[in-house]
Image (cartoon, rainbow, N blue to C red):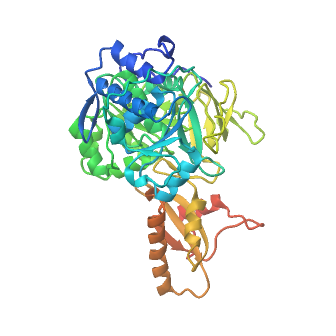
Amino acid sequence: MTTAPPRPAGDAVAPVPVSGTRSGNLVELLEESARAHGRLDRTAYIDEDGEHSFRSVYEGAGRAAAAFAARGLGPGSRILIALPDGIDFVRAFLGAVRIGAVAIPVNSMFHPDEMARAGDIAEPAAVVAAPEFDGLFTAPVLTARSLSRDDGAAVPPYADCAPHTPAFAAFTSGTTGGPKLCFHTHADAEVLDRAAGEAIGVREDDVCYSVPRMNFAYGLGNSLFFPLLRGATTVLTGRRLGPADCLALIARHGVSVYYSQPTFFAHMLAHPDAEGVLGRLRVAVVAGEVLPQALERRLRHIMGERLLNVYGTTEIGHALLANGAGSYREFTLGRVLAPYRLRVVDEEGRPVAAGCEGRLELAGPTIGPGVARGSEAPLRTAPEEWYSTSDAATVDADGFVRVHGRLDDVEIVGGINVHPTEIEDRLMEHPAVKEAAVCAVRRDDGVSVLRAFTVLRAGVDAAAAQEVRQELLAACRTTLTWYKVPEDVFFVTSLPRNHVGKLLRRTVRAQAADGSFRP
């Protein structure tokens, strides 16, 4: 099934290889690539504070590295980075990797309870975050300001790193439990660039913007690895933009490479300016969840093969499938990108025939299965080993892949994995709720949202039920991160269960989709 990757959408400058640097350090690779191609004084980033050159990016990373080193941090130290997208995040991340530490981005908008849990999982030696997070962690909290001060401290040299030395780790929801950490190495960014970066075809004259944040592996490639390796300019926004603001940003900055999830694209298309703004993009990359056929038709009408539908996982580090310019087939995810391989297997692990549905398995050089704690030895799958996903897929005779959805219980909303049990636990804390089930549904406009279905205890009348609905939604809003809050709560007489009482989640999804739940 392995095929040549799609051609890039335009000429792209090849990065300087890791093997050509003195230390094998990823940050040296990035800085030497900028120097070798004469980019140091060109604009690398634009954020709320203005424009930042490639030179200022690496000088700032050096100051952050000096601040980390002055606090005794160095090779192998785990540094949790809880900052919004912006130049401070970039410098902190690169500063950590420069000294041989492991940078671990985390969502800066997490609810405090979730932020504390992230700290428990990562077990960091230090945390970079806003001052108000001080006290949530056992590790010391450093602010972005403390990393940016030029106090005369010597900038440490690039730490000597082998290709397999861990450089960063990304949180994943996992498929059978809580969040885990997937570790990636100093060599991985270049491999990911040769696959997904080449398929996207980022160029020096591009302006990039990614709706997915850099605390995700996908957003990290979009906004950091690919543009720094290829010399593009990237726009960063600390706050989460709505569709209208995002369209205005694309127009204002002349964004040419734009990354988002299907749900957000669906929101954008409701705006009267969407077709004109999106139609001027050179490349639009969509990922994070299955792209509905109706939405793909609308986007293809605007952008044709300039729409690149990709698939990847946190364990991979970015994308390994791409459906766009040079390798396109409607309603698929395209074909696998070298150097990755894939196959589809049955329940016994045997490859299935072309066109038959089964479990998707992947192989390649960047796969890092998650671990439950940062102090555990990072897992790494050998390039020839198969890594089993939780996705149902088919591959046709020409190698074009269709992914049909998850095989496990994880819901995907806006490209983010959500464990429904966490939300159900919150709902069932209410004394009036007997049972609860949460699933993602797709509205007629193509937007994925969470919907909760609850069975109330006996004696709760209709008037009280409306008050319970508001209390349940309010409880979710105050205790959960925004994307985990259901759009609405529906009351039903029963939930589908098997003979031993286990909730039948596939039936829940099906009844939610066709409206057959009995009120």
Question: Is 164 or 418 nearer to us in this picture?
Answer: 164
The quadrant of the image that shows the C terminus is bottom right
Residue 390 position within the rendered picture, expressed as x and y whole percent measured from the top left: 64, 44
- Relative to 518, residue 233 above or below: above
Residue 460 position within the rendered picture, expressed as x and y whole percent measured from the top left: 55, 86
Q: Quadrant of residue 252?
A: top left
Please indicate, yes or no, whether residue 333 appears anywhere in the rendered image.
yes
Image-based side of 54 in relation to 482, left or right:
left
Please indicate, yes or no, whether residue 328 appears anywhere in the rendered image.
no
Residue 388 position within the rendered picture, expressed as x and y whole percent measured from the top left: 67, 38
- Relative to 154, residue 359 above or below: below
Q: How many marks?
A: 0
Residue at 66% over, 39% down = 376
Residue lying furthest left? 252
Residue at 37% over, 33% down = 91
Residue at 49% over, 31% down = 322
Residue 2 position within the rendered picture, expressed as x and y whole percent measured from the top left: 60, 23
Image-based side of 379 in relation to 80, left or right:
right
The quadrant of the image that shows the N terminus is top right
